[in-house]
Amino acid sequence: MNTLIDTPASATYHDGSISVILSSGREFSFPCSAYPRLAAGSPESLAKIEISPMGLHWPELDEDLSIRGLLRDHAKHEH
């Protein structure tokens, strides 16, 4: 099983969505409403995103989302 995946280079919150740019240059976004803990977050707490090689973390919301899972969910909604 290949465990190497594209890693996040940056992530930003704007107007109810999170936009992610991966190290490969690929970009995608997703609505905060798709994830209950994010949906309940304030704009200030949503803007405080920590990036790790495997995903995104919101310390004030105790939420972690993997890039692999986000890409899988994003692919489902593109069709």
Image: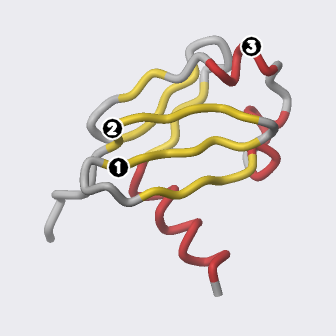
* Residue 67 location (% of width, % of height): 41, 50
Which residue in the structure is indicated by mark 2? 9
Q: Quadrant of residue 14?
A: top right
Residue type for callout 3: Glu
Q: Earlier in the sequence, mark 1 or mark 3?
A: 1
Q: Residue at x 73, y 45 (%)?
A: 35
Numbered disc 1: secondary structure: strand
Tag 2–tag 1 contact (CB < 8 Å): yes
* Residue 13 location (% of width, % of height): 66, 32
Q: Quadrant of residue 36?
A: top right
Q: Residues within 10 Å of mark 2 (few under 14, many from 20)?
A: some
Q: Residue furthest bottom?
A: 79
Q: Residues within 10 Å of mark 1 (few under 14, many from 20)?
A: some
Q: CA distance from mark 3 to mark 2?
A: 21 Å
Which residue in the structure is indicated by mark 3? 44
Residue type for callout 1: Leu
